[in-house]
Image (cartoon, rainbow, N blue to C red):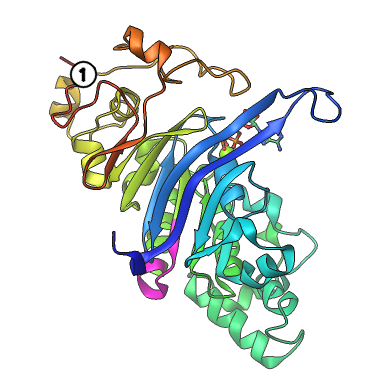
Amino acid sequence: MSENNVLLRVQNLKKHFPIGGGLFGRNTRAVKAVDGISFEIKKGETLGMVGESGCGKSTAGRTILQLYKPTDGKVFFEGQDLTQMNSAEIRRLRPKMQMIFQDPYATLNPRHSVRKIVGEPLVIQGVMKKGSSELEDRVTELMELVGMNPAYMRRFPHEFSGGQRQRIGIARALSLNPDFIVCDEPISALDVSIQAQVVNLMQDLQEQLGMAYLFIAHDLSMVKHISHRIVVMYLGKAMELTERNTLFDNPLHPYTQSLNSAVPIPDPKSEQKRQRFILEGDPPSPASPPSGCVFHTRCPLAEEKCIRVEPEFREIHPGHFVACHLADEKGSSKIFA
Ligand SMILES: Nc1ncnc2c1ncn2[C@@H]1O[C@H](COP(=O)(O)OP(=O)(O)OP(=O)(O)O)[C@@H](O)[C@H]1O
Ligand SMILES: [Mg+2]
């Protein structure tokens, strides 16, 4: 990937949350929520991030944005290392990096009008003055951008549907013209019929405005449409990362293959013929992850080496990364013979 296309570079990023009452660092037990992830996000691209509940997706998003202080690793934004910056320097970059959430209702102040909610970042950052006609115009523009009637700007969050509230959350995130938005399960709480509308809106906005997304979701079907590339997470680690189509057509990691086999195929004939592999059990606790490959306790192909040695997250083809001892160029680590 050519260097000047890279917006964000995440290098061996870790976020461990200490647990237990150990004082003065004597108790070193920790939840390894994010445990050494590395990837890049290009300007204007969508990187989908998927994995089961608790695998560290939200923590990864927040740690990248420096809302959590990383335990280790680096995050370069346009070549500058965010992890070395003080809070004033981070605050200056904040407008460039925004976040939207799963439940917009929980993050929109119920006592504030939509006008106030959407315009607030501009006022806080000192870009525009409260009550100015300039601000009114910008909020009008943002409402139109997300497909909402600007006449509704005097209404309050409870007067809107879930899909409309997510549009308000998006308008707010766009107010400062960000280059990067962490989208933490923005469609998971919406009715299925509304999900596609919001995804399409986010895609249109990206085409118009050129920002990059880290788009977090539980399962592959939710990121399939919008992602250029996808990273699959398991227990705080990246298992596989590649172009969207490659991930669906030639997944190399057994975990990706199992997630993939759960995505419905629209054609009933192929749906009937295809093999399914449903993972059993829950993922182990990130407070005591398994030895070797963290996936070995649930992997149908695990060998002795997988229990002992942690596989490296390696580039097996240009742009195709996988952390599996059994994966090779031919993709021989298939869970379906
Ligand atoms: N502030 C915190 N303090 C302690 N542990 C935390 C904290 N935030 C998250 N964790 C733990 O870190 C792990 C990863 O959590 P995280 O919320 O990042 O996962 P997730 O992939 O976003 O899950 P979900 O799909 O349910 O949103 C979990 O075991 C969680 O309990
Ligand atoms: Mg989460």
186 to 284, vertically: above or below: below
Residue 180 locus on image (x, y percent): 49, 63
Instruction: Give the left or right position of residue 303, taking residue 18 as reference.
Output: left
235 relative position to 90: left or right = left
Is residue 212 shown in magenta? yes
Q: Quadrant of residue 292?
A: top left
Q: Residue 124's x, y, as percent? A: 74, 75
Task: Bin the neighbour count of mark 1 within 10 Å (Cα to Cα): few under 14, some 14-19, many 20 and up.
Answer: few
Callout 1: CB less than 8 Å from ligand 1: no
State whether residue 69 appears in this view. yes
The tally of labels here is 1
In the rendered view of the protein, which quadrant contains the N terminus? Answer: bottom left
Residue toward you, 290 or 310: 310
Q: Residue furthest top?
A: 304
Type of amino acid at the residue the image marks with label 1: Gln
Q: Quadrant of the C terminus?
A: top left
Circle 1 sits on which residue? 275
Vertical position of residue 32 compared to residue 146: above or below: above
Foreground pick, 43 / 317? 317
Specify the quadrant of the image occupied by residue 17: top right
Q: Which residues are magenta?
A: 206-213
The image shows residue 217 at horizontal and vertical percentages of: 46, 41
Residue 196 seen in render = no
